[in-house]
């Protein structure tokens, strides 16, 4: 099978998913075109792909599911028997139904998800969990998988969808109770409002947060130039202590080919 174009499409509020997708494609003959669907302005984006394209879909896992803003945009991507690689990035707890949800979206839109990976990144809220991941061990495994899937792609006349774990109907996710808010050091620059994937920060009052719209992706905390946005420290300490006790044991990447 001859591949003429490679495209990476990712939802990556804090940069971890983008980094993992880049690791996976590092050994490819050519660097993929990157399409970042994180910004709210990308919700109306639609793209078409053919059988000689390869598309890598990368998403973070929130409560075992794909973030709803990512789902909105992914459903607008259209393939025509287009080979696809699925990547779910999660913070060392579990990826539950996220890969299955991503596989279902891809297959319904004309893609052939012939390879998939569940990869670990430092937790976006509980930073002590999977701290420093992906690390050198992860990188070595991920790059090796990238080599394997490209070889399969290059030597196969026909591809079949892989089977990934998960259940239907997908698990319910009611959101994370912790929502970032701005402190007194907020300058009102509006960077967080402009970059919020869920349009949860008013542009005219960027010190506020629409708690109903917020998906707790932590992008506003990541991009704030004066570090004015944060979670309630007491609530965070309490939650992180319990979460660390349950989910600190190292998990390894899972690859399906």
Image (spheres, grey):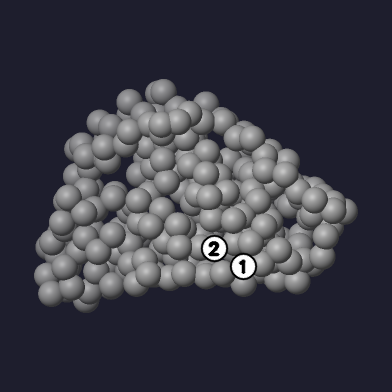
Q: Is residue 27 above or below residue 156?
A: below
Among the 4 quarters of the image, the one containing residue 8? bottom right
Among the 4 quarters of the image, the one containing residue 201? bottom left
Left/right of residue 194 with respect to residue 122 in the rendered view: left
Other-residue count near label 2 (Cα within 10 Å), few / some / many at <14 / 14–19 / ≥20: some
Other-residue count near label 1 (Cα within 10 Å), few / some / many at <14 / 14–19 / ≥20: some
Residue 203 visible in this rendered orientation of the protein: yes
Between 60 and 108, the residue placed more toward the observer is 108
User: Which callout, 2 or 1, points at the residue further toward the start of the chain?
Assistant: 1
The residue tagged with tag 1: helix, strand or loop?
Answer: loop
Check residue 49 in the rendering and tell me which mark sits there, or answer none.
1
CA gap, disc 2 to disc 1? Answer: 6 Å
Residue positioned 56% across, 31% down in the render: 165
Percent across and percent down for residue 202 are 16, 68
Which residue is under mark 2?
Answer: 78
Percent across and percent down for residue 218 are 33, 53
Residue positioned 41% across, 40% down in the render: 65
Mark 2 touches mark 1? (CB < 8 Å) = yes
Q: Quadrant of the N terminus?
A: bottom right
């Amino acid at each position: 099978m001859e591949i003429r174009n490679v495209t990476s499409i990712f939802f990556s509020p804090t940069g971890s998913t983008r980094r993992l997708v880049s690791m996976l494609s590092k050994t490819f003959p050519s660097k993929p075109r990157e399409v970042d669907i994180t910004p709210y302005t990308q919700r109306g984006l639609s793209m078409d792909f053919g059988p000689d394209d390869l598309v890598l879909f990368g998403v973070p896992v929130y409560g075992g599911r794909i973030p709803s803003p990512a789902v909105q945009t992914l459903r607008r991507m259209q393939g025509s028997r287009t080979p696809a690689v699925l990547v779910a990035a999660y913070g060392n707890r579990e990826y539950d139904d996220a890969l299955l949800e991503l596989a279902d979206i891809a297959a319904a839109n004309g893609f052939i998800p012939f390879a998939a990976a569940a990869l670990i990144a430092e937790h976006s809220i509980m930073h002590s969990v999977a701290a420093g991941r992906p690390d050198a061990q992860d990188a070595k495994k991920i790059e090796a998988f990238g080599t394997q899937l490209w070889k399969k792609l290059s030597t196969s006349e026909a591809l079949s969808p892989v089977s990934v774990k998960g259940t239907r109907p997908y698990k319910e996710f009611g959101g994370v109770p912790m929502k970032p808010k701005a402190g007194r050091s907020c300058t009102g620059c509006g960077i967080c409002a402009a970059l919020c994937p869920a349009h949860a920060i008013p542009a005219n009052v960027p010190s506020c947060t629409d708690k109903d719209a917020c998906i707790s992706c932590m992008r506003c905390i990541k991009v704030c130039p004066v570090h004015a946005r944060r979670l309630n420290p007491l609530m965070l300490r309490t939650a992180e202590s319990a979460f660390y006790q349950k989910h600190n044991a190292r998990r390894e990447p899972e690859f399906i080919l």
